[in-house]
Amino acid sequence: MPTPLDRLLDLPQAALGVRAARQQQLASNIANADTPHYKARDLDFRSALESALGGKAGAGGPVELARTSSRHIDAKGNGGAFEQAMKYRTETQSSVDGNTVDMDVERSAFAENSVQYEALLTFISGRLRTMQQAVQGQ
Amino acid sequence: MAGNMFNVFGIAGSALTAQSVRLNTTSSNLANADSVASADGRPYRAKQVVFEVKPFAEGGDAQGVRVTQIVESAAPMRMTFDPNNPAADAQGYVQMPNVNVVEEMVNMISASRSYQTNAEMMNTAKQLMLKTLTIGQ
């Protein structure tokens, strides 16, 4: 049974996971800035967080084919936990080699995501401190 | 979930490797811009790297980068008129490498910038990981 402490940390913990996943995706984009035909992707934070919290049924996990008969082939994407929240970026300036990574966009998103991640860490520490104070009763 | 952030190290590391291979190729091209004879006795040909997405086994979405092959440039060789050169043909022309020095310099700057960006990215991930370890202290 989840204790009040678990419930207190549920949201920031799920959000931290989504932030870490987004950081990983942005890192992939920056690493592949010179790879021909690479298409930049980003995580839709809202739907990723919803699936992390289990709020929307079927929103989590890899993309699957809809099957209307038991004889249809069962096929699944090989993406991670937030594959359904992954969206392709619309490019601002097209390049000849088909790469859609815009370094300015990716770098600023990476910095923003780092700050958000640190903010969540601060929130978690603050909540823990609050609970500790309540437990000590001083 | 912590595995996600550790993947950033793998991704940035793969990019660092790929970019340093590119830097190596560029420096080889620049060094041999005037090499009339390479190891096989024919004039040196400019080499270019080909990048490709490298998916990580676990984690699904993490995509690094790797060098699939190093191709030789198909650009025409530079012909210079130098009848006194021992490598000159009957008309007095010498086949020089097809290295485009301007192109290589641009390539070098681009590779070094990408390298810097990825090193910075690794640093940021390291700071975030260290900060995560201090939760509850």
Image (spheres, rainbow, N blue to C red):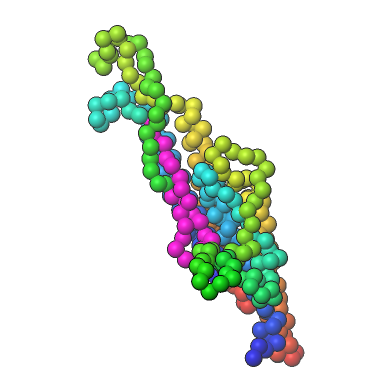
**At which x and y percent is residue B96?**
35, 21
Above-or-below relation of B77 to A61: above
Closest to the observer: B40 or A136?
Answer: B40
Closest to the observer: A126 or B16?
Answer: B16
Q: Is residue B57 visible?
A: yes
Residue at the image point whose x is 54% and y is 48% from the top: A38
Closest to the observer: B74 or B128?
Answer: B74
**At which x and y percent is residue A87?**
64, 57
**At which x and y percent is residue A115?**
67, 61
Question: In the picture, residue B74 is in which quadrant?
Answer: top left
**At which x and y percent is residue B66?**
43, 50
Residue at the image point whose x is 46% and y is 54% from the top: B54
Report whether B84 appears left or right of A112: left
Report whether A35 appears left or right of A138: left
Residue at the image point whose x is 69% and y is 73% from the top: A56
Main SS of residues in magenta: strand
Above-or-below relation of B61 to B31: below
Report whether A108 appears left or right of A70: right
Q: Is residue A12 visible?
A: no
Above-or-below relation of B129 to A88: below
Residue at the image point whose x is 35% and y is 11% from the top: B81
Name the quarter where the N terminus of chain A is drawn: bottom right
Residue A91: in magenta span: no
Name the quarter where the C terminus of chain A is drawn: bottom right
Give the magenta part as a residue range: B46-66
